Amino acid sequence: MHVLSADPFTTPEMAEIFEQADDFQKRLQNREGKREIYSTHIGEQIGSIFYEPSTRTKGSFEIAAMKLGMGVFQTENAGEFSSISKGETIEDSVRVLGSYGLAAIVMRTKEEGLVARAASASPVPVINGGDGKGEHPTQALLDAYTIRNEFDRLDGLKVVMGGDLSRGRTVKSLSRLLAKYPNNEITYVSIPELQIDAHTKSVLDAHDTPHHETSDMYEALHEADVVYWTRLQTERSLKGLPEDLEEILEAMKKDSIIMHPLPRIGEIKKEVDADPRARYFQQAENGLYVRMALLDRAVSSKQG
Ligand code: CP
């Protein structure tokens, strides 16, 4: 019932979620569709508990809930403004909030594995909105949705992931999803200190998904369908990225796309936004539709 990792999602389940997201996107275009959607889950509420800052995940989940007619109980900066600051355990906290009849709890924590701990004590579905350096499964779903919308498939793609890969949770979850589809190939571009973790590579190996590591981004970019860049995780303290992305746009295929989970902190300059391959704002918008689908499924499963 919980969404803690990208691992449990099957390709048919993802296809269903994406079809639902398509449907929500379409119906939101007109007043009648918006009204219909709004009546879907009136009387339900979600909890939105964030121990780390967020614009997209928190914003899109809460707006998704509101568009579905649901109420939102939210705690921003939960480490300071909830009883966790008095020493309460996350398990007790979630157990109590769940007992108030929430349909689901969306949670972001600073520490890897903490959302799973909360889920273990929760009477309602818990959705991982990012747990430290761990995973960000709903980001990966919206990323996969964006790729599927662009190429009409999620297999046979050459994907380059670059930037801070060791601490970036989005690349770990997206790699796990892409490994479920045949004939994908992933090239990780970073400096050795920031390269992808061994566990993600072992998941790719288990799915026979070829993967490579390089610090020569030009070599990887020529054939890439998708270039997925990530930011320097300054809040997790380390040094800079290899190069600015706009310097390598020249090397990319004309029909490739450039993605970024955002926020960007200078690794993609504003001038790149006008490049026809830029998809990061569409990607962020897609988060709303995918998260509406996820909340709809969570509430429907609770109602049985
Ligand atoms: N991509 C993402 O998780 O953004 P936020 O940190 O703003 O939620």
Image (cartoon, rainbow, N blue to C red):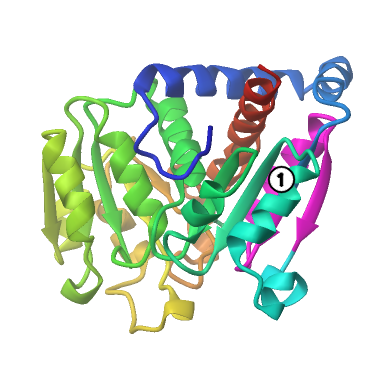
Q: Is residue 226 visible?
A: no
- The residue beneath circle 1 is 98
Q: Which residues are magenta?
A: 48-75
Indicate the secondary structure of the residue bearing disc 1: helix
Q: Is residue 15 left or right of residue 59?
A: left
Please tell me whether residue 73 belongs to the stretch shown in magenta: yes
Q: Residue at x 27, y 42 (%)?
A: 253
Asked whether, in this view, residue 57 is left or right of residue 184, the answer is right
Residue 74, placed above or below residue 80: above
Residue that appears at 80% across and 44% down? 100
* Coordinates of residue 76 in the picture (x, y in percent): 73, 65
Label 1 crowd bin: few (<14), some (14–19), many (20+), radius 10 Å: many
Q: Hey, what amino acid is under mark 1?
A: Gly
Res 224 → quadrant: top left
Location of ligand 1 given as a quarter of the image: bottom right
Indicate yes or no whether the magenta region holds residue 179: no
Q: Position of residue 297 (x, y in %)?
A: 62, 24
Q: Position of residue 209 (x, y in %)?
A: 15, 36
Task: Locate residue 90, reporting x and y percent.
Answer: 60, 63
Q: From this viewpoint, is residue 61 visible?
A: yes
Q: Quadrant of residue 155?
A: top left
Quadrant location, the C terminus:
top right
Residue drawn at x 43%, y 29% is 150
